[in-house]
Amino acid sequence: MKYFQMTLRILAVALLYCLFNPLTQAATSLPVVQPSGDCSALTQQDFSAQVGAGVRITSARSENSPKGSYCKVAATISPDIRVQIALPASHWTQRFLQVGCGGLCGSINLRLSNTAGCTPAMNGEFVVAATDMGHSGSMMDAGWADDPKKRIDFAWRANHLTALLAKAVIKAWYKQPPKYSYFMGCSDGGREALMEAERFPGDFNGISAGAPAALFTVQNSFFHGWSVVANQRADGSAILLKDRLEFIHRTALAHCPTLSGVNDGILQNPYACHFSPSWFKVCKSGESSSSCLTAEELSVVSRYYEGASDGDGHKYVLGGFPIGSELRWPVPATADAASPSESMVLPALQSVLLAPGHSKITSMKDFPLTAANFKRVNEYAPLYNATNTNLSAYRHQGGKLILWQGLADDSISPVISQAYYRGVVKTL
């Protein structure tokens, strides 16, 4: 069967660009500016005053790449924010790009994504900077969150101070500031992008926020937690397994109009289709499951489409998995295997979303999805969440924002991005 991956961007959300820039302009061609001195001399400069925190330049050396030579600067901002900045040595066209970090970060990634067709980026004409957001470790390592200061660095401080440092280094080496500054990130990097637009509207002229984990406290608790608990029996074994997803996906598409007039297996608007359990035949005892679902499996399918809720009428998320996303559902291959969502929800609950001090949460049984626990995780919403829809300060600065989201995303709920877009439109 052809694998239908629904990755269409939400048109309405992408139109945020039009909201901020109703008159589309051609990209400006900027002249090359040459550096003023030797790369290594940057290690002798103190940028603490420009950043507002202690800065130590740990190295500055010339390196070569397929896109030309550049000066690579490594620095630490107090207390433990590591930063890297790559400055073109001979073909800088006055643009600066800061790259966001995914997951819980912990490492520095200067690689560019989603830049195909952007000639200056592909040619290596940008100064590029990135940070580990204040801690070192794997993408889902959360042990750092026992330190309240590192929580603040992760939430917003590290990226803001990295922007200030990068601009100061640019001015020191090229003797002028960047003409345009951009931020680009996806997933948690998308949250970081929105955080910049909301909290520090003067940092960047243009921001690309991809699939933003804007509702961080809910996304990493109830959204991912529901993927686990909604598919478990009382003994912890998984009900719905990966080998059933293709049948579920094929059946769902058969019951939903494509709206395009072409039966190409792609749902332009999955929210125009509403799930009904009647789509599936319930398997009889001993019947082959190739063309039916067991009652248990059908219950999981219904819960996945619905999203996190409890038996008391509380609904904790804006929506469940969209119809058409079935091939990406985070279910295990075998009944005794762990859900892929556990690798995201457990570290967050153990260290990041609750009060500092390692929580004794080893499975979702230790954190029932109740109204009381919903209140607990959202005590940190003002710190982590990037949900302020009043972007008037960013618009006043002339900022441009592109917000995009894959509609089959099983990690970041597309409904959140849609709700954020509608909130911005209503506010502005």
Image (tube, grey):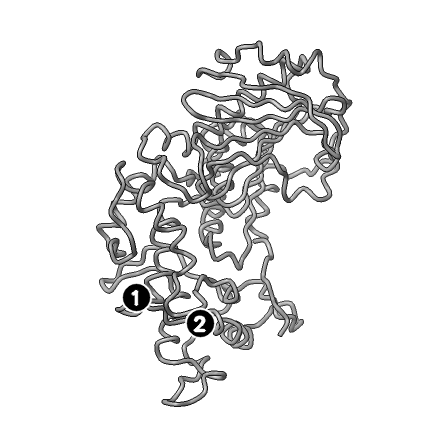
Rendering coords of residue 346 (x, y %): 34, 50
SS state under label 2: loop
Tell me the residue at 24%/54% (across/down). Answer: 366
For marks 2 and 1, the one nearer the N-term is 1
Q: Is residue 192 above or below residue 311?
A: above
Relative placement, left or right, of 38 versus 182 is: right
Residue type marked 1: Gly
Residue type marked 2: Phe
Rendering coords of residue 137 (x, y %): 44, 38
Observer-side mark, 2 or 1, equals 1
Identify the mark at residue 192; answer none if there is no mark.
Answer: none
Identify the residue position indicated by label 2 in the image: 275
Identify the mark at residue 236; answer none if there is no mark.
Answer: 1
Tell me the residue at 37%/51% (across/down). Answer: 345
Residues at marks 2 and 1, CA–CA distance in whole angstroms: 27 Å
Q: Are marks 2 and 1 in contact (CB under 8 Å)?
A: no
